[in-house]
Amino acid sequence: MFQEDFKWLRVLKLEPLAQLVVLPTEIGNMVHLRYFSPSCCQINHLPSTMGNLVRMQTLDIHDSVLLESKTIANVISRMEELRHLYMPYLNRWSRRIQLSTLCKLQTLCHASSLSWDLSDLVKLASLRKLSIELFGKLKNLKEILRRSSSTLDGIRSLSVCNNDEIECAGGAREVREIVLSCRYVYKLRAFGPMHGRVTGRAPVLLEPHHVIVALLSSAQGRPIGNTREAAKLLSLIRHVFHESASTLVCSRGGFPRLENLFLRGLIKVQEWRVEEGAMPSLCRLHIADCPELKEVPEGLGYMDTL
């Protein structure tokens, strides 16, 4: 497949294949390759020769299944021109990947706390989009975030997923620490188990025009939209994987500028109450995967813009 005829190839995207894909070592000869994406493919491993692809700018393996991880660390760390790296979802690789050599990296998605050391953030000064998946407690998190403050201030899009179902309260606190350290994000998503009030508030310096926030809480009947940051939001996504609350409340004056509201995955919510003046600018409402929700709230009748 990867013969002399393809040595000048810049873009390589593999279509989904049902069978196991074995990448030949000859792929390392495609030294001009800038983009590689084995879409929805099951790959046994990344050949060590891929480390020769030093001109690679985008490596997208987010929806691929990698059976072996022993060569991944060496391959990726040598791609020093890499701008965009999309890792597989929920990867639990035992060997850690060192990303500190990727100084030009702008996008890092699905970075697992099991296979990546967050202290590498110090070296990733060009990072603008970050997606982290947390498994268990992180050591020295506050110190790492403090030392990485210049990198975190450059991030504009942040996604944090708490996958720790056992220590979910501790995981929620870590999500909060990470979110509050990224002071200039304009797109924010936070997913996973969150208990009590540990989610806190959004960063004070959130940009007012492009913010997408996932607010998570399991407090029974707790109002959402009662922080001053919520008043800036134009779009709100409420998407929860583990939710025990049965009542959702949107309080008066909570979202004066909110135009788009997406409620999705609230599997336990039975009642939704909207107070008058809660969302006076709402013009689009989307509800999905809320099987226990009995009816839309009467408070929607107050909204002339909907």
Image (spheres, rainbow, N blue to C red):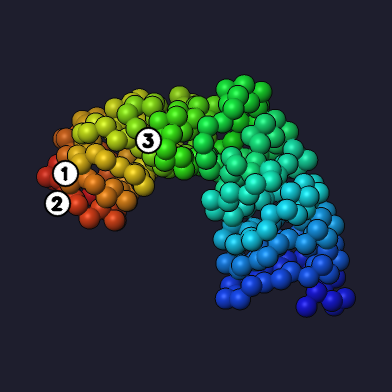
Question: Marks 1 and 2, Cα distance to the nearest angstrom?
Answer: 7 Å
Query: What residue type is disc 1 on?
Result: Glu
Determine which quarter of the picture holds residue 276. top left
Image point (72%, 42%), residue name: 99
> Which residue carries the number 2 mark?
294
Image point (53%, 32%), residue name: 137
Residue density around tag 1, few if under 14, some if 14–19, many if 20 or more, within 10 Å: some
Residue 226's x, y, as percent?
29, 27
Q: Is residue 99 above or below residue 34?
A: above
Residue density around tag 2, few if under 14, some if 14–19, many if 20 or more, within 10 Å: few
Image point (58%, 49%), residue name: 92
Identify the element where label 2 is drawn.
loop
Query: What residue type is disc 3 on?
Result: Met
Residue 231's x, y, as percent?
34, 30
> Which residue carries the number 1 mark?
271
Identify the element where label 1 is drawn.
strand
Mark in front: 1 vs 3: 3
Q: Is residue 118 visible?
A: yes
Disc count in the image? 3
> Which residue carries the number 3 mark?
194
User: Pointer 3 and pointer 2: residues touching (CB < 8 Å)?
Assistant: no
Of the residues under marks 1 and 3, which one precedes in the sequence?
Answer: 3
Residue 273's x, y, as percent?
17, 39
Identify the element where label 3 is drawn.
loop
